[in-house]
Image (spheres, grey):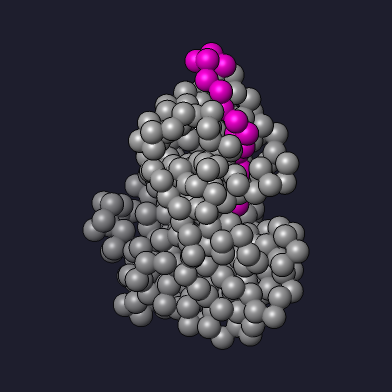
Amino acid sequence: MKYFIGIDGGGTKTKASLVDENLNIIAEATGGPSNFLVFDINEVADSLINLFNDICTKANINIPNVKAILLGTAGAGRRPDAERLEYAVSAKAKEKNLVVNNFRVESDGRIALEGAFSGKAGSILIAGTGSFMFGKDSKGNLHRVGGFGRILGDEGSGYKIGRAGLSEVAKSYDNRNSGTILTQLLKDKFGISDTTELINEVYKNNFDIPTVAPLVIKAAEMKDKLCLEILNTEVDGLVKHITAMRDKINEDTLLISLIGGTITTDNYFAKLFRAEADKIPNVKIVEAELPPDVGAALLAKNLIIEN
């Protein structure tokens, strides 16, 4: 029997699944954060080695019996960055006299895509703190739309919605707009009540801008005109992501799995988005078939087949 480990890395915790060659889950385990662009890369490597040990102990097998291990994590979209972590894990394994076969690092979007469609063609739309689309066509070619970050992109994200809301609040302090319910909601939630407090929070106190997004959504649901305009603009941005991906993948029907709290939770923005997305020709939103960690295990299995 061949065994594989798939790992879904995160900024707070990391989830691993050990599977057999039929993708049956044999054991599961969780470990610490694996975002090596935020945390020390050697500490991440050490945490991953401990995770390998934990899950293999649960499954009662030795690490060398695992044919391949694949981690999907933020910050690994560029191959040179991914290779840095691969090297760090390899060095840590040698330091501990462990044999780790075929360890590979991919982006978190890549494993989510693979899991969502069990390796088949399709696309994921991620809209949480940031936003982007990742897709694969029937020939196995990968396609990306968006992902330019908060300065150049992130349409439909918590950051973009929150930032636009704060901009309207700033204008309301100067009477540069018709006023917004969001001004009072911001005061009630965060105690921000004037220009000085807003500037200090944003520019001095590292204010968490995406936390304002739920307030913008709430104000829009209360029929606040300015906040409704913000949501409609961001919905349009996500719709353009979808139509661009549909044209890139060029299948009869583009299957999309949704990821991220902005568009997957039961909120007013998500409802606006789904209503518009349902109007797009040749597009169908579906539930993910497998979780990202099992998607990572599928990629690990394919790594062995390809080699």
Is residue 302 in view? yes
Residue 286, horizontal then vertical, whole percent: 50, 73
Q: In this view, does 203 lie above or below 101?
A: below
Q: In screen coordinates, is 121 left or right of 41?
A: right
**Of 110 and 147, the residue lying toward us:** 110
Q: In which quarter of the image is residue 158?
A: bottom left
Residue 68, horizontal then vertical, whole percent: 58, 38
**Of 72 and 149, the residue lying toward us:** 72
Residue at image location 38% in from the left, 43% down from the top: 28
Q: Quadrant of residue 55?
A: top left
Residue 218, horizontal then vertical, whole percent: 33, 70
Residue at image location 62% in from the left, 37% down from the top: 104
The magenta-colored residue range is 94-111
Residue 122, horizontal then vertical, whole percent: 62, 67
Q: Does the magenta stretch include residue 149?
A: no
Residue at image location 30% in from the left, 54% down from the top: 193
Q: Is residue 102 magenta?
A: yes
